[in-house]
């Protein structure tokens, strides 16, 4: 559900999700990442435009690393939302295809979906965009290891 369509209960949950992800991952806080929507196994996060994240000062285009971090965080959030509980996860693989430069001086939004869970691995796909998901900046596919109490679900020590 998108933030602008959310009722008070959903807005409160988005507020709590933002607090949790900022506390757990300081890098998310440093980048200014914030939830703008969520669903079962789905997350949408925004990377606000900031000149400190620009990769090319002549064009004002955001650095690909900042977009990668946005996509990784959003994919991880989708996994947590699919699991329904805060569980330790780790990125196993994240393939990102950069399709075009981000529009200068515009925020980037990412929407990710966790479409498959196994006992120890979650599979995700995502798209990052400025104004419209139909004109993406980047697309991603990845997998995440799921940990339980310091061990992988299969019992290996973390």
Image (cartoon, helix red, strand yellow):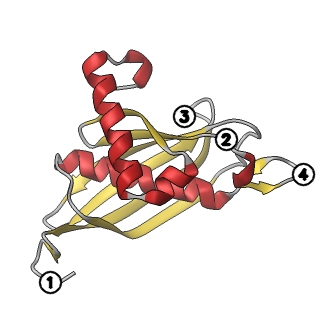
Left or right of residue 88: residue 56: right
Numbered label attached to residue 133: 3
Q: Secondary structure at mark 2?
A: loop
> In 3D space, how far apart are the residues under numbered discs 4 and 2 (Cα atoms)?
15 Å
Q: Would you say the residues marked 1 and 3 are in contact, meaning their CB atoms lie under 8 Å apart?
A: no
Dot placed on the residue nearer the N-terminal end, 1 or 2:
2
Figure quadrant of residue 16: top left
> In 3D space, how far apart are the residues under numbered discs 4 and 1 (Cα atoms)?
49 Å
> In 3D space, how far apart are the residues under numbered discs 1 and 2 (Cα atoms)?
40 Å
Which residue in the structure is indicated by mark 2? 49
Give residue 138's position: percent from left, percent from top: 58, 50
Q: Would you say the residues marked 1 and 2 are in contact, meaning their CB atoms lie under 8 Å apart?
A: no
Q: Nearer the viewer, mark 1 or mark 3?
A: 1
Which residue in the structure is indicated by mark 4? 58
Say which quadrant the C terminus sits in.
bottom left
> In 3D space, how far apart are the residues under numbered discs 2 and 3 (Cα atoms)?
17 Å
> In 3D space, how far apart are the residues under numbered discs 4 and 3 (Cα atoms)?
26 Å
Which residue in the structure is indicated by mark 1? 156
Please tell me which residue is depicted at 25% across the width and 21% down the height of the picture.
Answer: 9
Say which quadrant the N terminus sits in.
top left
Numbered label attached to residue 62: none
Q: Would you say the residues marked 4 and 1 are in contact, meaning their CB atoms lie under 8 Å apart?
A: no
Q: Secondary structure at mark 4?
A: loop
- Residue furthest to the right in view is 58
Q: Secondary structure at mark 3?
A: loop
Q: Nearer the viewer, mark 2 or mark 3?
A: 2
- Badge 2 density bin: few <14, some 14–19, many ≥20, Cα 10 Å: some
């Amino acid at each position: 559900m998108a933030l602008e369509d959310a009722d008070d209960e959903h807005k409160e949950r988005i507020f709590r999700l933002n607090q949790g992800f900022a506390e757990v991952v300081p890098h998310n806080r440093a980048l200014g990442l914030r939830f703008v929507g969520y669903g079962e196994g789905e997350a949408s996060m925004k990377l606000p435009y900031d000149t400190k994240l620009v990769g090319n000062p002549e064009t004002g285009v955001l650095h690909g690393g900042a977009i990668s971090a946005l996509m990784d965080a959003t994919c991880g959030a989708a996994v947590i939302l699919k699991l329904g509980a805060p569980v330790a996860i780790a990125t196993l693989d994240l393939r990102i295809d950069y399709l075009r430069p981000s529009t200068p001086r515009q925020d980037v939004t990412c929407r990710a979906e966790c479409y498959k869970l196994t006992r120890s691995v979650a599979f995700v796909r995502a798209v990052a965009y400025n104004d419209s998901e139909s004109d993406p900046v980047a697309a991603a596919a990845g997998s995440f290891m799921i940990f339980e109490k310091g061990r992988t679900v299969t019992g290996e020590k973390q």
